[in-house]
Amino acid sequence: MNQVHRRIKLKNHQNKSQIHTHKSFIINIPKIFKFAIIGESFMQVTASAPGKAILFGEHAVVYGKPAIAVAVNKKAYVTVQKREDERIHVDIKDLKLSGYIDPENNEIEIESRENSKKGILNYVLSAVKMVHGSAQGMEIQINLDIPIGAGLGSSAAVTVATIAAVSKFNNMNLSKDEIAEYAHDVELEVQGAASRIDTTLSTYGGVIYLSKNAEDIVPLEINWNIPLVIGCTQDRGNTGELVESVRLKREGYPEVLNPILNAVEALTNDAVISLQKKDEKKIGELMNINQGLLDAMGVNTTELSRMIYLARKSGAKGSKITGAGGGGSIIAYCPGKIEEVTSNLNTIEKAFNVEISKEGVRIEVND
Ligand code: MEV
């Protein structure tokens, strides 16, 4: 295989991307081509990247308070193979979603029927644009064991795995730092705004402590497997709207909300020590206090509450919303009670055990 390749910086086109379904165009995003790659590609490359869960500090992190988040062993898998033609076809069987992406014209053409999860293809298109500029056709297959839109970082995991797989397929050897940087650029392009929490965890794995608006990221050495169960409600909270609602609440009641945010900061810092000492009782109590404060911020729902209290009744030492709330998921800390909590939560919603993924993005090449 010819390992020699050239990178050519292309002009930054300002066109907008369009998703074509059989009915309409729905999303526009600006077009960025970073590189063109010339050289032979591998036969098949697979990259995997983990999703994430926030253990402490969501929402408060928006105001410069710390948060603790973990990469979880629910992953996105992206496999890239050569096609005989020059088109790029994407198939996400778990979502019954497939279509062609055209990085040159910034277009997505969906083959499947109307699909509420089609927005994920914007991340795939933007990720491909970052690392693919040649005329090489590709078949991209994506498998997911992370639920989409449940606050578990599925779009970051898909983005990181796509960048890793497509870049390797095109003979680029990106460092993890470069993958994380491109993935953050993709989230900015598609979402308009994004913290680095999800893309960092999908790239590097492990446990992280974030401060100063999630710009300072410190890996935490946690040498034991935190027993966690995730429960996903059917509702999908809108992160942007929830962040805005907390902002408005803080603006309306600064003397009430600011002490709440300070309390989240204090409990998150306490949680670092409790996690390092494996102080089960304290970890659970701090999660429950954090939940009370998230409720006070107004991001709880009846469904989330039901799961949170059912988890505690089933033996969880602590349980809370994970992520933005308003729907999405809960996380329960369940030493010795994983099976009870999982099966009881499963009677009302989808629940599963997760473990910390120490490994971040991983690439496998098949020549
Ligand atoms: C969403 O997963 C976490 C929030 O704190 C928003 C953010 O940090 O970007 C609510």
Image (cartoon, rainbow, N blue to C red):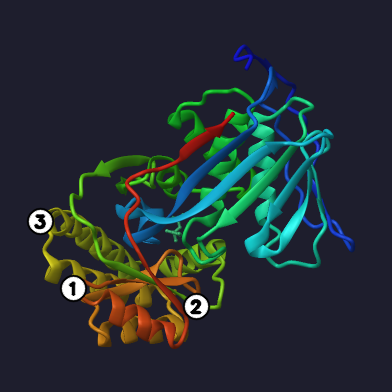
- Residue 294's tag is none
Q: Which residue is the site of mark 3?
A: 277
Quarter of the image holding residue 166?
top right
The residue indicated by pointer 1 is 285
Q: Tag 1: residue type? A: Glu
Image side of residue 338 versus residue 366, left or right: left
Residue 103 appears anywhere in the view = yes
Dot 1: few (<14), some (14–19), or many (≥20) neighbours within 10 Å? some
Q: Say which label, 1 or 3, has the lower sequence index.
A: 3
Residue 359, horizontal then vertical, whole percent: 36, 44
**278 above or below 360?**
below
User: Residue at horizontal 17%, vertical 57%?
Assistant: 275
Q: What's the residue type where badge 3 is placed?
A: Lys
Q: Between marks 2 and 3, how big is the CA–CA gap?
A: 32 Å
Task: Give the SS element for disc 3.
Answer: helix
Residue at the spot of label 2: 233
Of the four image quadrants, the one with ligand 1 is bottom left
**C-alpha gap between disc 1 and disc 3:** 15 Å
Q: Residue at x 57, y 45 (%)?
A: 159
* Placement of the C terminus among the 4 image quadrants: top right
